[in-house]
Image: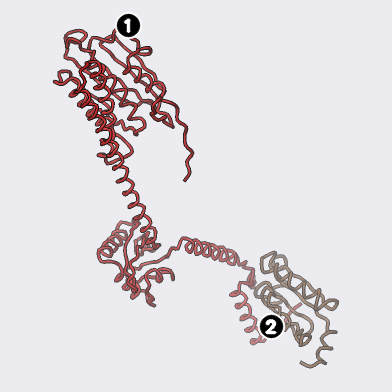
Chain colours: A red, B brown
Amino acid sequence: MNRDTDSPHLRLQEYESAFEAIRNEEVDAVVGSRSIVLLKLHKAEQELRQSEERLRLAMDAGKLASWEIDPATGTLSSCRRLKEMFGVSASDGKSFRDQCLALILEEDRKRLIEADERALATGEGFEMEFRIRRPDKEMRWLRTQVMPVKDGQGRFDRLVGIASDITERKKTREALQTSLQEKELLLREVHHRVKNNLAIISALLDMQRQDVKDPVAAAVLRDLDTRIRSIVLLHERLYQNKNLAWIDFQDYLDNLLHDLCFSIEGNCRICCSANAQEICLGIDLAIPCGMIINELVTNAFKYAFPDGKTFDGRCAPEIRVEAQKENGNYRIVVADNGAGFPKEIDLNNSQSFGLSLVRMIGTHQLGGEFELDRSAGTRVTFTFKPPKQVKHLTGQYQRTEATPFHP
Amino acid sequence: MSKSDCSFNTSTQYHLILFVAGNGPNSSIARVNIAGICENELAGRCTLTIVDVLKDFSAAAENNILVTPTLLICKPEPEVTVIGNLSDHEKVRRALNLEALQS
């Protein structure tokens, strides 16, 4: 099998063929005079190419451009897409970088250059959005994510990053923001109008009351008026709030107690205080809770201090309202240090309209429980778990069906 | 080439040696390619020896094989080598002097 390859010309030809085959990746092993070298390179290179291809496809899918800045030479090298984003076509890295920088809006350019310098100094990457004015005068928003890269000596000497055009996303976000603001304005307007209409009803009731001679009828009208005003107050708080969805219950209670104190008691000799810190309720819960508190506090004002004295006759008359949240349950306490609830009145069977209302809202609508403590004045504790779907307050306190949601 | 060459070609006997490195991807491709040629164009008039250089290094050294896969056409003389995975059929046909059959 010995072969004559002594001819230098033939040998040279074979070498050339061998090199060509290696270049074409058609070779598995190189045979030396004493050993064989297996070309694993082939596989590794193939994997690398696949990985590069995958990365390229992913970058294409995300419409991302990759780039690299060498601050020492001031050059910017990038893929084709970055040139398309900027709309420039420089051939060398130096003028490409200069062209790109010139297109970035001045204040953004300053920010970007500062951030680049900071990244090289600290070794920490950053993200930034900036505007460019393309040669065709079109304004575009770009977003870049930058990472500093170390050289052989461990110094950060290059910046590598990706960039994407976020103009459309920005436009969508702005449109969404505008639409949201419009909705907020509209909602505020709705709350304002509801409040105004309820205020008109309240004013009508007040006028009627002044016209009524019968003291019982006048009292009924006044109670009705305070009930309506407790709801007016909620809508007022809502449209004056920054947040239209939640009511700061502390703020609401302060206002409610102030109103009640002024309208029922007149000269405010009973000390009123509320503590509902960090309790925020949606309008679905705030209305029923507000009505319960309104009734119980009105009751206390009217009956707790018949001769202006406390249960022990020593301390000053006081009505306290507390709201707390514990393990997902709400607890509302309305307490006074007055004469105490009459023994014959039971919260569960009372014929009084106000207490019936409290019971109906509390147990039927909110599914909660009441506890009455008459040991030192009156202390009514109402505990409830906020339902996922709050039953809405209707004329007859009937359960409302949840409407299916169609987007 | 002339037609007389063609008649000469059809009766030529071939002796081929394929040097491979185990089941490397290119060696496997070369095996398939040469088997195809032996079964078709050279059917009945060729002998093929496959040498795995990982098992028989001396055969590779004796024949001054540089890389694998390499096809060594021992007969007809003069000896010719084809380096690579033999996917370039034209190149292999030229080396085997089979071109005349097509023309």
- Determine whether the residue tagged by mark 2 lies in a helix, strand or loop: loop
Give the residue number, with chain letter if any, for mark 1.
Answer: A344
Task: Determine whether, in the image, residue B71 is placed left or right of residue A327.
Answer: right
Task: Determine whether, in the image, residue A406 is placed left or right of residue A194.
Answer: right
Give the residue at x 22% y 12%: A338
Q: Quadrant of residue A40?
A: bottom right
Pick whichever, A19 or B26, lies toward us. Answer: B26
Give the residue number, with chain letter if any, for mark 2.
Answer: A5
Residue that extends furthest to the top in the rendered view of this protein: A344
Give the mark, 1 or 2, whose residue is nearer the N terminus: 2
- Determine whether the residue tagged by mark 1 lies in a helix, strand or loop: loop
Chain letter for mark 1: A
Give the residue at x 47% y 46%: A407
Nearer mark to the viewer, of 1 and 2: 1
Tell me if mark 1 has few (under 14), some (14-19) or many (20+) residues whose alpha carbon lies within 10 angstroms of its own: few
**Could you tell me the amino acid type at mark 1?**
Glu
The percent coordinates of residue A138 (x first, y second) are 34, 69
The percent coordinates of residue B31 (x first, y second) are 73, 70
The percent coordinates of residue A356 (x first, y second) are 35, 17
**Could you tell me the amino acid type at mark 2?**
Thr
Pick whichever, A103 or A153, lies toward us. Answer: A103
For residue A266, above or below residue A172? above
User: Is residue A220 at least partly visible in the picture?
Assistant: yes
Q: CA distance from mark 1 to mark 2?
A: 125 Å
Task: Determine whether, in the image, residue B3 is placed left or right of residue A311.
Answer: right
User: Is residue A149 at least partly visible in the picture?
Assistant: no
Tell me if mark 2 has few (under 14), some (14-19) or many (20+) residues whose alpha carbon lies within 10 angstroms of its own: some
Picture quarter with the N terminus of chain A: bottom right
The percent coordinates of residue A174 (x first, y second) are 34, 55
Chain letter for mark 2: A
Give the residue at x 84% y 78%: B45
